[in-house]
Amino acid sequence: MRVFRLELKKILKSRRTIILIALSLFMSVLMAYLPVTFVSVSQYDEAGNKVASLKGLEAVRYTKILQEGIKGELTPEIMRHAVEEYQACMREYNAEGTWDLPGDVYYKRIFPIYPLLPRVREAFSDRKTGFAPAITDIAPEKVDNFYEACDERIIALGEMEQKNSQAARQFMRDKYRSVEKPYFYYPGYNSDAMDYELLLAILLLLFCTVIAAPAFSSDYQTGADDILRCTRHGRMRLGISKTATVAGISGILYTVCMTIYLLLSNSFFGWECTRTSMQVEYSVTSLANWNMGELQLAVMFAGLLTVIATVCFTAFLSSRCRNVITSLSIGLVMCFAPIFIYMSIPDSFKPGLWMRCMLPSGGLGMMSSFLYSIIDYEFLTLGSLAVWTPYAMAGFAAVEIVIFSVTAVRSYMVHRVA
């Protein structure tokens, strides 16, 4: 324990670590606020004159007022009313779309129901082509069967997305069957906040990799390791302490920063927004039975596994490399590897999907991250076996934490100075 405390003190006293911790805390606050600045609405008086352009927190509060009528449980009657109101407004103003409407009419009649319209279109998409119809082409009486249409939609998606895997299609049907209906919606939230949670997690991944890179290689580089190996606890216990220290600091830093982010972000948008069904924010056929608050926590936890797995991998690199630059460079390449693979390897090439999921940093690969895997329908298939990619990412990361932490210690114990 004394060795661990000494290693902890050594890392925390480093100027590099102090700067990265301070920057992490600052970015947590900044990135929690930035999505709020993207919200904007216009305010009109009774005569139809624009009186103000609201942004930020004012816009969030005004949005809640305008969309008060669809707050809470989204029954088929509410969904049908939204379709009927939209169609009536289009007919009354002889408009082809919302862009043809006067501004005051849009904010009075369409904006209060707008969040529901994309979900209705999606539910009644063509079964074979997947194309969503215009709201004006959907008969209002069909919307009474909105949730039945969602059940049919997931079957159609399974046939389109997973033609070659019966197990994946069955998983999609069974998983979606557990989703609670009716959905719930609480206005004001901006889904950009989820993207910024992911972006913050990626920044923390980079910072923690920088903290972990010198764990062993800095001592190799300075020659201090020659002395440390001659001490009583200079091999296994020191190796365990170094690995546990960088993993512990990274895990605590990540958890603190993400907690700050979620507390501030949800305070800005309103805590009731966390009760919105993720199916309303993303897709009516999202497979996870979560509201937005549960999705936030799931992404946070998956990111924690990813960060610790990547830090343990970086510690392993550090135990093998004789200078900090080499271990840091390879560690940073690993952080960006899932993004490179996603952008360069076609989705049809299945080994590419396996590679993204198996990488220690795979859970934070932007468009290929745990967040976007949750709202997608990708599976790792092997014969009759099909594993949903979010499960695979979390599972691989948990296993890699053990593997790379053990190999880091083992590699340090057998290291020989040339």
Image (spheres, rainbow, N blue to C red):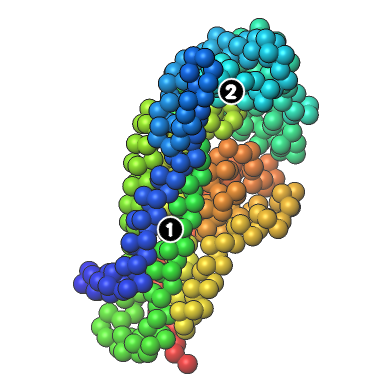
Could you say which quadrant of the image residue 15 lies in?
bottom left
Which mark, by number, is residue 103?
A: 2
Q: Label 1, secondary structure: give it.
A: helix
Mark earlier in primary sequence (2, 1): 2
Q: State the residue lying farthest toward the bottom.
A: 418
Asked if residue 48 shows in the view, the reply is yes
- Identify the amino acid type marked 1: Leu
Task: Residue at 43%, 58% (x, y): give it.
Answer: 204
Asked if residue 183 shows in the view, the reply is no
Pointers 2 and 1 in contact (C-beta within 8 Å): no
In the image, is 56 to the left or to the right of 231? right
Could you say which quadrant of the image residue 296 lies in?
top left
**Is the residue 261 above or below the residue 226 in the image?**
above
**Image position, residue 183 (x, y; %):** 50, 21
Which mark, by number, is residue 204?
A: 1
Q: Label 2, secondary structure: give it.
A: helix
Task: Residue at 49%, 36% (x, y): give it.
Answer: 39
